[in-house]
Image: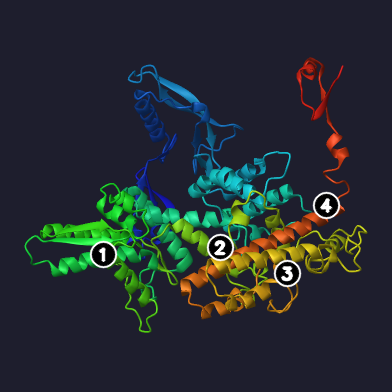
Amino acid sequence: MMLVIYYHDIHIKSINHARLDVPHVPSEASNLQVSMIEAMDDSLLLYSSIPLLLSMARHADRFQATYGWETEWRKSAFYAYNSPFYPNSSPTPTISIPSVDYANPSSPTTLHHDVRVVTSHTVFLRVPINQPDLHFQHIYDIISDFNFPLLHWRLPLTALRRLISQCLTSKIRPLLALQPLTPELAQKLDQVVAHKVHEYLGFPFHFNSQLLFTPLSLRGFDFPSLALLNSALAAAGVHQDLNHHIPPFCQMAHVTLSDWSCQLNGPPRNTPFPLKSASILTGEAYGIAAAYTLALHRHSHQPRPTVNLYTDHLASVKTITSPLHSQPHKLSRKPPRSIYRWIADLQSRALQTGLHIDLSHIKAHTTSSSPPAQLNRLADHAATSAQKSFLPIPPALPPTFHMDPFSPFNAVDGWIETDLTRHLLHALATSSYVSSPSLHHFSSLLYDHRAPPEFPYLRSTSSFSAVVQLYLRAHQLDTASRLSACLRSGAQPYCRFGCESLEDARHIFVRCPRFSSLREEANKTIVSATSTLFDVYDVPAQYQARALEHACTISHDSQSWPTGYTMYYYGVLPHIDDIMCDLNLTSLSSLKVERLRLRIAATWHTTLIRLAGRIWGIAKRASSPSHPSSPENHNRKSLITLPPHLSYISLLTKSQKFSIISST
């Protein structure tokens, strides 16, 4: 975008329109006249001449003083660009700004305040505008100053993730929303956060930073990524302003969109992709809209009839019937808002024709014999049967005629009406995962495709097993073999438990006889848990044998694994569908079979990564120079030396955890 001056007025235009005066599209021809920008307790006055700016500054100060507001002149600044007067020879240039007497704002008395002059860049809401290096340094300092709490024990990885999300990312998010960074600088911020986590965990070799910020569904650890958030907020912010109800926001977003479109995509053109059917997530609301349309068509000529509609989707009933939820600003944040607007339009047309449509909620999956309950069961049966139909189902196109004026479109997902920031975060994370071969060593073609369970990675109060997974999947676990190869300190690469073999990850977790009993115990736990799940789902005994046979050897090299070598310690599983193929022969529905397989996969995964965590914990304790639980460590007290004027504290303290010595 460019600033253009017309007769002392400042206008914002797109680059193409400002330079060539030939807009590609009509919306690009719009320009925004700006004289003041204000947000929270910060404001900018924009004028093209110093006398005019000084005059308007006094008027603005008088206006706010009338309401009891006072300007903090020590924090104020005068930004001058392309001025013949600034910069000047003074090392600290200042300018005298006129003001009013705050005790009597209507008085003609004029007071003057010296304000520093800045010619390098503008700062608004503590954010340097169009200065990515300074902005990056500001956020970098915030991350550097952030420290995890000092406790007697290390916080689990789940707590570190929560602290970064709530105490660090929440502070940086508004800064990125106001002024995004370049992708390269945002990636550096992620690396700084990852380094801080690595330093806290205390492992010698650094893990792959991208692995920490990859979603859990892609076998990452789901830490909030500043790089992905930076890109998502930039696009979502423009989309929000394009549909803003205040015209200046829309005009400014039009200018930004025009510049982005020309720079990234060239001149706009029609999309060659066909429209896709509405998502299953909006099927309930779409069904209500179809019922409204059918009611309007069939009862348009009857004298004031009343039509009763029933649905088991309580959220849609509240949105449509409640005046609070159906307001335009409320609908603007709902995912299927175009369908709800369509329903509101159908409701309005029905009232105009004298047709009253009564929408009511009916509880689903009940044994009630009432007509609405029976109709609901019939509708559920029809919807379930349609999924098994061999004939193509007619598409239900989204109502584009009631969409936002600007709606994002994707060739894969079609029209996007969900939370754009969340959608972009997932899409960008998936794209980054696909383009980074180091993140997918274990292809879903060889191993089970199901996502790991959330509990051990996101909510567990003790997540050492997750930490071990982080370094194992990055191939940075400090085994003796890796320590010998990387540190070159003369350390032996052989097993610390006396085995005549190199101590790599496979030896420690699969072959070392020191942990044979732990592996057998884990196998028995998996067999017992799997058998219990089979009993809960009433799986006949003859269909359990194959799965239990594989469970007995899951932590050993066996034919259960696609390559014959167990990889349990990397948090992957063999194909559960192949191991549990006998479940297809039972009388269970396909939905119950999939749920059972999902629960079995989660149980196996959790047990096996805990096994890896136990093994590595024992290995680390065996190699540590002093056992943390030894009596000499418990009896040792820290010494604290106090200055003479604080010597009385040694007489008052009752703590037995440290000794206090007074210096004289």
Return the residue at label 3. Answer: 555
Mark toward the start of the polypeptide (1 vs 3): 1
Q: Secondary structure at mark 1?
A: helix
Q: Is residue 635 left or right of residue 6?
A: right
Which residue is disc 2 drawn over? 429
Q: Secondary structure at mark 4?
A: helix
Give the spatial CA distance, label 1 vs label 2. Answer: 35 Å
In 3D space, how far apart are the residues under numbered discs 4 and 2 (Cα atoms)?
A: 37 Å
- Going from N to C along the chain, the mark reached first, 1 or 2, is 1
Q: CA distance from mark 2 to mark 3?
A: 31 Å
Q: Amino acid at mark 4?
A: Arg
Query: Residue placed at 52% from the left, 62% from the top?
Result: 426
For badge 3, the amino acid type reads Ser
- Residue occupying the point 82% across, 61% down: 479
Residue that label 4 marks: 621
Q: Residue furthest right?
A: 490
